Image (cartoon, grey):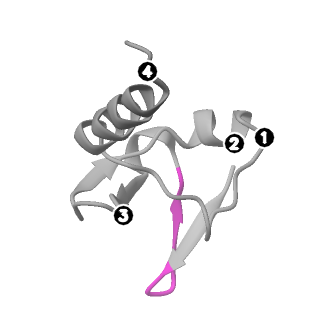
Amino acid sequence: MFYILHKRKLIPIDPDRVYAFCPQCGVLHAVDLQAEIADGDCDLLGTLTYCDECGKAIRAAALAATGKED
């Protein structure tokens, strides 16, 4: 198990309490840390996680750029 130290207290990191700010819109959203780690390319300081809405927009733009549909 992993912990963070906050105000001299150890707080366990569990899957239901991991959040990040979307780098595109700034909304705070839940992150599936286990999925990020399982991906094999996880860097806790450098990994960007987008909210669902921005993620969908990014995927749609990428598909449109390639001429494919979802």
Quarter of the picture containing the C terminus is top left
- The amino acid beneath tag 2 is Ile
At horizontal 51% and vertical 45% (from top left) the residue drawn is 14
At horizontal 61% and vertical 41% (from top left) the residue drawn is 36
Queried whether the magenta region covers residue 27, the answer comes back as no
Q: CA distance from mark 3 to mark 4?
A: 26 Å
Do the residues bearing badges 1 and 3 touch, measured as CB atoms within 8 Å? no
Q: CA distance from mark 2 to mark 1?
A: 6 Å
Dot 4 or dot 2: first in sequence order is: 2
Disc 1 crowd rating (10 Å Cα; few below 14, some 14-19, many 20+) is few
For label 1, the residue is 40
Dot 1: what SS? loop
Dot 4 or dot 1: first in sequence order is: 1
Q: CA distance from mark 2 to mark 3?
A: 19 Å
In this picture, residue 70 sits left or right of residue 14: left
Please identify, in this view, whether the residue under mark 1 or under mark 3 is nearer the observer.
3
Do the residues bearing badges 2 and 1 touch, measured as CB atoms within 8 Å? yes
Secondary structure mostly taken by the magenta-highlighted segment of the chain: strand
Queried whether the magenta region covers residue 9, the answer comes back as yes
For label 4, the residue is 67
Q: CA distance from mark 1 to mark 3?
A: 21 Å
For label 2, the residue is 37
- Numbered label attached to residue 23: 3
Do the residues bearing badges 2 and 3 touch, measured as CB atoms within 8 Å? no
Dot 4: what SS? loop
Please identify, in this view, whether the residue under mark 4 or under mark 1 is nearer the observer.
4
In this picture, residue 18 sits left or right of residue 41: left
Q: Which residues are magenta?
A: 6-13
Rendered location of residue 35, percent (x, y): 60, 33
